[in-house]
Image: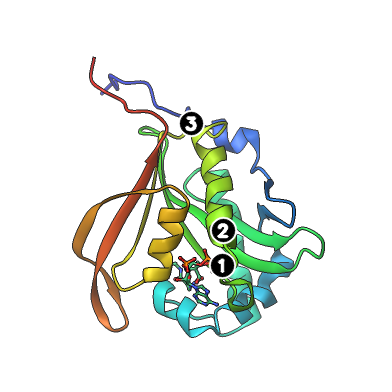
Amino acid sequence: MPFLVAPAISTGALAASGQPVLPVGADASLRPWLLSDAEAVREAFQDPAIQRWHVRRADSVDEAREWIRGWRSGWRDETEGHWAIVDAASDALLGRMALKSLSLADGKAELAYWTVPSARGHGLCPRAVTALTRWALGEGGFHRIELEHSTANQASCRVAVKAGFEEEGTRRGAALHADGGHDMHLHARVRQARQPS
Ligand SMILES: CC(C)(COP(=O)(O)OP(=O)(O)OC[C@H]1O[C@@H](n2cnc3c(N)ncnc32)[C@H](O)[C@@H]1OP(=O)(O)O)[C@@H](O)C(=O)NCCC(=O)NCCS
């Protein structure tokens, strides 16, 4: 059955353009993951806060390497985009930023993130969210970037607000964590209002 609407982003456009490297101010950048990041990912996932909000733990470097393989193939498959936040000078891992559940038809994606404990409290995550969203809503061709967090995760809510993601409401009981069901607070940024003509 033919589609009646052209997709917001043509199939193949993202894969063909290559995954961008994006500056996050002068001291950090977003770059595609490398297999050599596996030990730093394993270490990050020892943090109880990352385990709590991302519902995973990494038991070995091999396991982390498998995740990284999946994160890298997401761009080629145009299903997900995953970036490491790294120190601009040393390339040390500072965090993670991802665009998940890509819908090329609607030009929509969901943002996810964490920062390593030693990098927290300096506004790094909101700056990385801002850099990635600027690319996504500009050159990337997306129209809407969503971000949601448990209503119990106030630090993540602060990131969303500081990065200019408007609050759109609460999805009740929308996520299951180790301690049970969580209400999820939805935020979004849109490139422009799209109205029916
Ligand atoms: C949420 C998170 C990504 C914020 O990253 P960040 O780079 O520290 O971002 P910010 O510096 O802007 O801090 C955001 C909020 O975290 C809190 N915070 C500040 N210092 C902190 C620290 N050392 N440790 C933990 N939280 C801290 C504050 O509430 C801050 O808001 P404020 O600036 O209004 O005071 C990070 O704490 C994290 O990775 N947490 C665990 C995983 C997680 O929650 N991921 C998001 C799932 S939706």
Helix, strand or loop at label 1? It is: helix
Q: Residues within 10 Å of mark 2 (few under 14, many from 20)?
A: many
> Which image quarter is the N terminus in?
top left
Task: Indicate yes or no: mark 1 CB to ligand 1 under 8 Å.
Answer: no
The picture places residue 186, in percent across and down from the top left corner, at: 30, 54
The residue singled out by tag 3 in the image is 11
Q: Amino acid at mark 1?
A: Trp
Residue under the image location 41 percent in, 79 percent down: 52
Q: Residues within 10 Å of mark 3 (few under 14, many from 20)?
A: few
Establish if 110 lies above or below 189: below
Q: Which mark is residue 67?
A: 1
* Separation of residues labelled 3 and 1 (CA atoms): 24 Å
CB-based contact (under 8 Å), mark 2 and mark 1: yes
Q: Amino acid at mark 2?
A: Trp
Residue under the image location 70 percent in, 62 percent down: 86
Task: Indicate yes or no: mark 3 CB to ligand 1 under 8 Å.
Answer: no
CB-based contact (under 8 Å), mark 2 and mark 3: no
Q: Residue furthest top?
A: 197
Counting residues from the start of the chain, the first of labels 3 and 1 encountered is 3
Counting residues from the start of the chain, the first of labels 2 and 3 encountered is 3
Establish if 5 lies above or below 182: above
Residue under the image location 60 percent in, 61 percent down: 124
The residue singled out by tag 2 in the image is 71
